[in-house]
Image: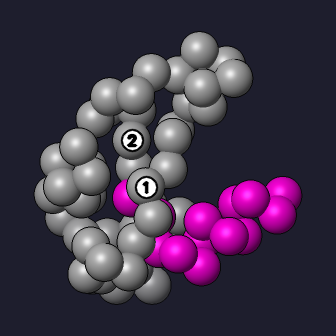
């Protein structure tokens, strides 16, 4: 599932500003639920995105 999301994004983090997206190694990314489980999100590839670890932390802080 992680690999599927990663390949769909072509290794880029969707949270990075446009033009600043770098292609990342899958090992440096964190799996993220687009729609959280608490709101009915399912554990499936289309609800999964791969975020750069830093972006994921930033998102969590909001
Ligand atoms: Zn990012």
Q: Looking at the image, which residue is at 31% across and 78% down?
A: 27
The CA span between labels 1 and 2 is: 7 Å
Main SS, magenta region, reads helix
User: Mark 1 near mark 2, Cβ–Cβ under 8 Å?
Assistant: yes
Quarter of the image with the N terminus in it: top left
Could you say which disc has been placed on residue 48 in the image? 2
Is residue 40 toward the left or the right of residue 18 in the image?
right
Could you say which disc has been placed on residue 31 in the image? 1
Is residue 43 toward the left or the right of residue 37 in the image?
left
The residue stretch that appears in magenta: 50-62
**Magenta stretch contains residue 26:** no
Rendered image coloring scheme = one colour
Q: Looking at the image, which residue is at 51% across and 40% down?
A: 33
Say which element carries label 2: strand
Image spot of residue 25 (x, y percent): 25, 81
* Quarter assignment of residue 54: bottom right
Image spot of residue 37 (x, y percent): 60, 26
């Amino acid at each position: 599932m992680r690999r599927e999301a990663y390949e769909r994004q072509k290794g880029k983090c969707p949270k990075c500003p446009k033009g600043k997206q770098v292609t990342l190694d899958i090992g440096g990314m964190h799996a993220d639920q687009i729609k959280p489980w608490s709101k009915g999100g399912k554990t499936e590839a289309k609800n999964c995105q791969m975020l750069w670890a830093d972006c994921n932390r930033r998102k969590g802080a909001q």
